[in-house]
Image: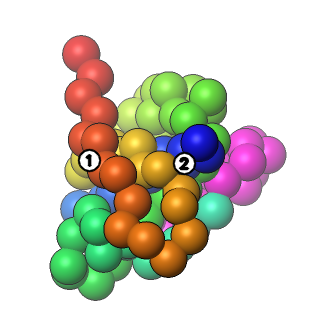
Amino acid sequence: MAYSCYITFPTTFYAIRAESLLKAEGIKFKMVPVPRSISSSCGTALRCDCEVLETIRSFLLGNNLALENFYKLEEIGLKTPTVEELHFE
């Protein structure tokens, strides 16, 4: 099974700032619309390989960026994916 991890942001400002910071560092990610399985509200989320989620999270927090939530989604085509909300200490 293929999984991707997602980070959501409290506002679009933080999503755009995260994109700018991560591009400058050369970290692999993609900005995408928030998947409907996570939230029905509009917005932008960061999608990445789950192996680099902690690196990205630490980097963005170290740059005083506000993050909302973290999710792990099973990528299964057009079917509703399995969603797991992730929590960090």
Amino acid type at mark 2: Ser
State which quadrant residue 81 falls in.
bottom left
- Residue placed furthest toward the right: 26
- Whether residue 55 is in magenta: the answer is no
Residue 66 visible: no
Question: Which label's residue is closer to the chain start, 1 or 2?
Answer: 2
Q: Residue at x 59, y 42 (%)?
A: 1
Tell me the element at label 2. Answer: strand
Residue interval drawn in magenta: 15-29
* Relative depth, front residue between 86 and 78: 78
Q: Residue at x 43, y 64 (%)?
A: 45
* Relative depth, front residue between 30 and 13: 30
Q: Report how many numbered discs are placed on residues in the image.
A: 2
Distance between mark 1 and mark 2 Cα atoms: 14 Å
Query: Can you tell which of label 1 and label 2 is closer to the viewer?
Result: 2
Tell me the element at label 1. Answer: loop
Against 28, is 56 above or below?
A: above
What residue is shown with label 2?
4
- Whether residue 27 is in magenta: the answer is yes
Horizontal side of residue 18 vs 86, given as left or right: right
* Relative depth, front residue between 29 and 74: 74
Give the crowd class for mark 2: few <14, some 14-19, many >=20 residues within 10 Å.
some
Disc on res. 69: 1
